[in-house]
Image: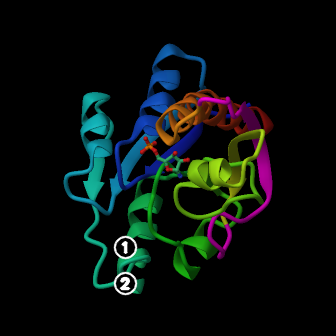
Amino acid sequence: MKRLRLGILGSGKGSNCRAVLESIRTGTLPADACVVISDVLDAPILEIAREFSVPNAYLPPGQFRTRLEPAVEGELVQILRDAEVELVVLAGFMRVLKAPMLEAFSRRIINIHPSLLPKFPGLEAWNQALEAKEPVTGCTVHYVDDKIDHGDIIAQREVPILPNDTAESLHARIQNAEHELYPAVIAQLCRES
Ligand code: GRF
């Protein structure tokens, strides 16, 4: 078993990042968080990194909306390499990664998505599940490839959809499941390495 060196990437509120950092702090996740990087200057995820004393950086993403400018993505690779990151953990990172990252960290980038993939990739997956009148949805941790919310599935957790569920109540229960699943999967990857 190896303590994996993690680099966490996110664009938003960072609740999954917090769950990972708390699991490291309590000792249930034998990993080291080396750096947290965001493409959003005032993203709460950066504040969470500071709260846990994890080195953190804002990476100005460049001119595109859904991906990083290639030179910026090259810079990201360098930051992660300088921090000797072994596993890249996407935690609400809203940009599609391309060749620089996918080649530098082949099969070493994971993501969490709020549905039972391959069902409902894309935005607001809990709403998609509600609208499709599914009896159950959940969350998925998967390796990242060049397609959105796609790649080999590592683990899933089911969340039943209740008769009175609203988008908010369902989303909250899926996030609770994510906060258990993501640290557990990273711990499993540590045990396997
Ligand atoms: C999570 O629901 C995750 O499934 C999706 O983005 C969301 C990030 O939430 N990829 P948070 O920033 O970790 O709170």
- Distance from mark 1 CB to nearest ligand 1 atom below 8 Å: no
Main SS of residues in magenta? loop
Q: Which residues are magenta?
A: 145-164
- What percent of the width, then of the height, locates residue 23? 52, 23
Residue that mark 2 sits on: 71
Please rate how many residues cluster around mark 1, counting C-alpha atoms within 10 Å: few if below 14, some from 14 to 19, many from 20: some
Position above or below: 112 against 77: above
Instruction: Looking at the picture, tell me which residue is in the foreground, 18 or 54.
Output: 18
Q: Is residue 40 above or below residue 112?
A: below
Kindly tell me whether residue 86 is visible in this rendering: no
Q: CA distance from mark 1 to mark 2?
A: 6 Å
Q: Quadrant of the C terminus?
A: top right
Q: Are marks 1 and 2 in contact (CB under 8 Å)?
A: yes
Where does label 1 land, which residue?
75
Residue under the image location 53 percent in, 55 percent down = 124
Which image quarter: residue 1? top right
Label placed on residue 115: none
**Is the residue 13 above or below the residue 106 in the image?**
above
The residue lying at 54 percent from left, 72 percent from top is 101
Q: What percent of the width, then of the height, locates residue 112?
A: 61, 48
| Image-quadrant location for residue 47 | top left
Please tell me which residue is depicted at 39% across the width and 41% down the height of the picture: 14
